[in-house]
Every structure is written in C-alpha cells, then in structure tokens.
Amino acid sequence: MPDFRYRRLGYVALNVSDLARSGAFYEEIVGLQPSGAALAGERLYRCTQRHHDVVLHQAAAPGLRRVAWEMESADDLERLERHLQSLGMRTFDVAAEECAALGLARAVRVIEPHLGAVFEYFHTMVSAATSYVPTVTRIARLGHVVLATDAHADTERFFLDQLNYRASDRIEGAVTFMRCWPNPLHHSFGLSKGSSKRLHHVNFMVTDIDDVGRAMYRLKKHDVPIVFGPGRHPPSESIFLYFLDPDELTVEFSFGMEEFPEIAPREPRLLPMSLQSIDYWGSVPDPRFAAQGVIAPLTEPA
Ligand SMILES: [Fe+2]
C-alpha cells in the first residue's frame, strides 16, 4: 500500500480557446486575481496567497490540460514517483525554466493510465509577492476537480489502491468523491461515471454563503448560463452553484464541506442514485452541465 502523503490539490491548468476572453471571465466574473504569465500562451491566476491556483492555456480544444497535486515533502514526491515507475508508468521531469515560471521547486508529470489525463506532482510552491485581494467573490481555495470516465470502476480502484486517495462517499452508479490522503477535505477530486472521458467541473470554495447568492445575481446580470443550482449536495453538505465559462466548461462555487480526521475517519457512505442524493433543494441540471471539456494528452514531455 503506498504511503506517500499529499498536502492538497495544487492547481488546475485549463485549455481555453480564447485566452483574453477566458482571462477576463475568470478575473471579472469568477473573481480570480491575475498572477502573471508562465509559458508562452499561458496566464496564471490565483484566489489565495499562493503563486497561482489556475493556469489558463490557449489551445484549440477547451478542457483539462492537467491537474497538479502538492505533496507534503520532497520525500513524499520521490516515493510517489518511485511507486508510479514501479507500476510501469513513465514520469516526466518538468523543465527547470517551467518550474521557475510556475513557482515550483520540483515537479513531475505522468499520464494517468485510465483517464489519459496529465497529472503533475510537486512538493513546494512559492507564495505570491503580494496579498490576494478578493474582488467580486471571497474565494477560500480551488476546491476540487471532477473528471468523468466510462471506465469508472477500474479508475476508482487505481486512485484508491495506487495513488493513495480515500473514498469519502459514493453516489451509486454516478460519482465517487475522494480526498487526497491525509488532506481533510471531503473531496479534492471526484470521478463521475459518464459515457466518455472528459473534464466534469472545476470547483472554487467560497468563504460565505452570501458569495453564492451574490454570484447568482452577478452571473444573471452578465448572461452567464447557470446550469445547476443553487442547491445543497447531501454527500458533502455543500451549497452549490454551477455555471459555464466562455468555452462552456462547467465551474462551481460551493460553500461548506465536511472535513475528515487523518486517524479513524468515518467509513464512506453509499447514497442511492436520485436527484435527492445530488440536491436536497430539488434543482435540476441543464443539459449543458458538465458536458464540455476535453482531457488533453501530454504534448510536451520535458
Ligand atoms: Fe463539485
């Protein structure tokens, strides 16, 4: 059983079809703060004191570029790397110039074999030089990323047995919510059962329920499609609101989440598949909810 320890979801890199348009959306509508440029065709954004929480990358097919995970230490990163190599997975060191642009000490990338998604692992991210100043939303953190897959059982097993995640709850036949051990948040990652492999949604946790309510009126004012919610998820007790970015990628704001102790956590629950398991309040998802988002292959091994 692997024993490497995660600190948190590190950041998410999204491919967007129009960097200027999406940059303006994530800054003005979502409330992220620009945090400089990285590689050519990339912009960094943050919602914390961290170097960045989101990378936007200009690309033809909008969706997920990679998900990055912060390990507790350099030793944890090395143990994870050795473990993945022992499974026959190839690891790619991120070049020094790109690490410097991303504010990372050291990072490796792999192709997750079930989803075909690029996962990055690093152990230290420098802090931003200036404070994060909330504008339209008081965001607490990048909360979680959910990916959809048509090979749910095998993928879930791989995450639990080989990548050292823990299942927090499952909705039968629909989704598995996982935490990156020993991070206490109910889920930093979710695997949704779907007809294809794709990005499902990206979540930002907000600090106050008013941020969800204010977002609803702001989104309506700017004609941003709200595709699910507001509602309350039974599994994590979160109040949620899902909306679409300019490429119709699904973004979520949520408030509140159960936290798990490292020692003796409760067992995961299996909730029956019904709209009641997804929303206590009875909202119904729009067909565009979580419909768009290509998982990009690794295109630039270091
Ligand atoms: Fe979510």
Image (cartoon, rainbow, N blue to C red):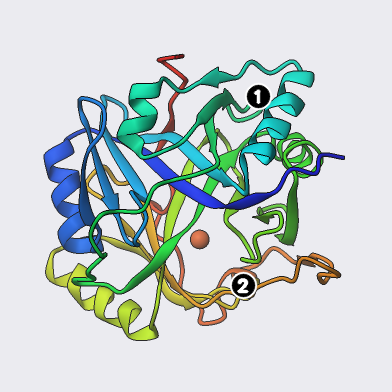
**Where, quadrant-wise, is the N terminus in this rendering?**
top right
User: Which badge, 2 or 1, is on the more N-terminal residue?
Assistant: 1
Calculate the distance from the C-alpha at mark 2 to the C-alpha at mark 1: 28 Å
Determine the residue positioned at 86% across, 70% down.
Answer: 264
Give x and y (percent) for residue 44.
Answer: 26, 43
Left or right: where does residue 243 sit relative to residue 142?
A: left
Q: Is mark 1 within 8 Å of ligand 1?
A: no
Give SS at disc 1: loop
The answer to whether residue 172 shows anywhere in this view is no
Mark sitting on residue 113: 1
Q: Nearer the viewer, residue 27 or 102?
A: 102
Mark sitting on residue 246: none
Give SS at disc 2: loop
Give x and y (percent) for residue 126.
Answer: 39, 47
Q: How many marks?
A: 2
Labelled pair 2, 1 in contact (Cβ < 8 Å): no
Q: Nearer the viewer, residue 114 or 140?
A: 140
Q: Which residue is mark 2?
A: 236
Left or right: where does residue 90 sit relative to residue 87?
A: left
Inspect the image, locate mark 1, and give the three-letter code of the amino acid beneath it: Pro
Left or right: where does residue 172 sit relative to residue 61?
A: right
In the image, residue 257 sits, relative to residue 152, either above or below, namely below
Left or right: where does residue 98 sit relative to residue 68?
A: left
In the image, residue 236 sits, relative to residue 203, either above or below, namely below
Inspect the image, locate mark 2, and give the three-letter code of the amino acid beneath it: Ser
Determine the residue positioned at 16% across, 35% down.
Answer: 18
Give x and y (percent) for residue 259.
Answer: 65, 73
In the image, residue 211 sits, relative to residue 56, either above or below, namely below
Label 1 Cα neighbours within 10 Å, binned few <14 / some 14-19 / many ≥20: few
In the image, residue 192 sits, relative to residue 80, either above or below, namely below
